[in-house]
Image (cartoon, rainbow, N blue to C red):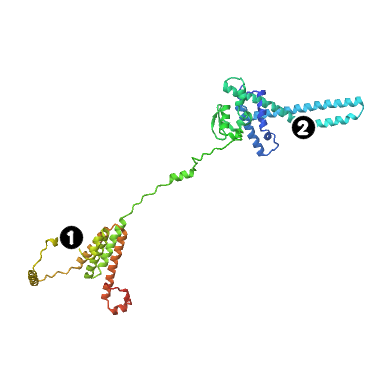
């Protein structure tokens, strides 16, 4: 005979009691009269949960959902048949009694009493079936609780003995009502928690311990003196703040670019040479002298105040020391000898002819101006402070532009100025 055609073993009394206990937990869903798709789906989910809990606790063998449903409805049908038979027997017995009483006594006084009794029996028939099922499930619940306690004691001590200590250590959760609704069976030895997903061994003590420690709300441990402890020393930081701190880059150290200042000074030198080329030679030479004097004075102001004061008076700073040294060694001269030597020198200078210097070409003049511009650039680069450098550039430009305006005024006549329509107050004379 093939394996698929073998008949499954019948349900014993222990399995019947355990199934009725599981159905009692979900009776409000299974016995509902709704016929919508939502109700049917809800019933299927409940039967699947019953099948999962049944197979996890019963050791006789796995049962399918269809087998459990079929067996439950057979029990229900049998109970209805038993109730209907009892009602028929009661009706027959009461009817015989009523007929005998009326025939013997011959009075109508007992008819009203018998009719009232029959009406009360008809109303009691509807509730009798529910009472029968409730009595059966209550008996089965007590038997299953005793069996679950025996299974726990065997897992701990390895024997079937039951003691009072195991009752005291038993958790508040009920095995057949609330435990297996929160676990899913993965294999014969391992289960998975449906709330946190933790994988645990298929042991009742382990499952109870997990629910009490991790999911204490499910176990129903309502302690009146319960206090929630919050540690304020280590505040919880959000993940966004940590990400911001990790991604935040460090600031770059920027050094000042001195090449831009040097390029500015070199451009200023080219600008000076271009302005000086348009001026006459005597004016250009005087401006060069004034520019160098201006830069040197500014340089001396930075080095020290004593040297600056001597330069402003038009004296050499080393002249005082030389004079003091010469005073000690100097002797008085004869005035007659000095006058005679002076006359001899004058006669010699008159007799020697003066040499004429050749005029410089324009190219040589341009080279001089260009070299002067480079010299000014080198002097300005020696100043470490940019504000002093900027002030010197301003003063140099003022000197050159003033000289240019003065030369323009000298070249133009009054008539030419009137024709051009230029105001005379714009021209400034060099003092």
Q: Secondary structure at mark 1?
A: helix
For residue 93, side relative to residue 417 (left or right): right
How crowded pointer 1 is (Cα within 10 Å; few <14, some 14-19, many 20+) is rated as few
Image location of residue 201, percent across then percent down: 55, 28
Q: How many other residues sit within 10 Å of disc 2, few (<14), some (14-19) or many (≥20)?
A: few
Indicate which disc residue 321 carries.
1
The answer to whether 152 is drawn above or below residue 370 in the figure is above
- Label annotation for residue 126: 2
Residue at the far right: name it: 106
Query: Residue 242 location, x and y as percent?
Result: 46, 43
x and y percentages locating residue 204 in the rendered image: 58, 27
**Residue 33 relative to residue 388: left or right:** right
Q: Is residue 283 left or right of residue 9?
A: left
* Residue 297 visible in the displayed image: yes
Please identify the quarter of the rendering in which residue 409 is found. bottom left
Q: Is residue 328 above or below residue 4?
A: below
Q: Quadrant of the N terminus?
A: top right
Quadrant of residue 385 within the rendered picture = bottom left
Nearer-N-terminus badge (1/2): 2
Q: Which mark is residue 209?
A: none
Disc number lying in front (1 or 2): 1
Horizontal and vertical percent position of residue 90:
81, 26
The quadrant in which residue 183 appears is top right
Residue for point 69% across, 27% down: 138
Q: Residue at x 16, y 61 (%)?
A: 324
């Amino acid at each position: 005979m093939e394996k698929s055609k073998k008949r499954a073993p019948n349900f014993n009394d222990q399995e019947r009691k355990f199934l009725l206990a599981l159905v009692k937990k979900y009776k409000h869903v299974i016995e509902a009269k709704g016929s919508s798709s939502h109700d049917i789906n809800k019933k299927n989910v409940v039967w699947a949960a019953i099948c999962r809990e049944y197979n996890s606790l019963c050791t006789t063998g796995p049962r399918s959902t269809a087998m459990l449903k079929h067996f439950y409805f057979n029990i229900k049908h049998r109970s209805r048949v038993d109730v209907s038979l009892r009602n028929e027997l009661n009706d027959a017995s009461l009817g015989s009694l009523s007929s005998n009483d009326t025939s013997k006594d011959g009075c109508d006084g007992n008819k009203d009493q018998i009719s009232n009794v029959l009406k009360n029996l008809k109303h009691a028939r509807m509730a009798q079936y529910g009472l029968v099922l409730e009595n059966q499930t209550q008996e089965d619940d007590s038997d299953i609780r005793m069996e679950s306690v025996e299974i726990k004691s065997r897992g701990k001590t390895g024997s079937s003995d039951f003691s009072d200590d195991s009752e005291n250590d038993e958790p508040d959760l009920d095995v057949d009502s609330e435990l297996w609704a929160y676990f899913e069976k993965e294999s014969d030895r391992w289960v998975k928690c449906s709330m946190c997903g933790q994988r645990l061994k298929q042991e009742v003590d382990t499952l109870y311990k997990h629910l009490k420690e991790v999911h204490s709300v499910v176990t129903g441990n309502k302690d009146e003196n319960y206090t929630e402890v919050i540690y304020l020393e280590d505040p919880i930081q959000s993940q966004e703040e940590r990400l911001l701190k990790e991604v935040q880059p460090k600031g770059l150290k920027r050094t000042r670019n001195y090449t831009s200042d040097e390029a500015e000074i070199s451009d200023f030198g080219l600008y000076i040479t271009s302005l000086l080329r348009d001026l006459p030679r005597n004016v250009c030479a005087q401006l060069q002298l004034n520019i160098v004097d201006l830069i040197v004075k500014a340089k001396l102001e930075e080095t020290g105040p004593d040297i600056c004061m001597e330069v402003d008076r038009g004296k050499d700073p080393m002249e005082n020391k030389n004079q003091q040294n010469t005073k000690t060694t100097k002797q008085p001269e004869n005035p007659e000898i000095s006058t005679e030597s002076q006359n001899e020198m004058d006669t010699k200078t008159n007799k020697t002819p003066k040499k004429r210097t050749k005029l410089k070409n324009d190219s040589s003049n341009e080279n001089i101006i260009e070299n002067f511009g480079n010299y000014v650039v080198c002097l300005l680069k020696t100043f470490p402070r940019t504000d002093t450098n900027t002030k010197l550039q301003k003063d140099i430009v003022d000197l050159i532009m003033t000289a240019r305006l003065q030369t323009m005024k000298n070249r133009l006549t009054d008539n030419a100025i009137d024709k051009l329509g230029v105001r005379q107050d714009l021209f400034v004379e060099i003092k």
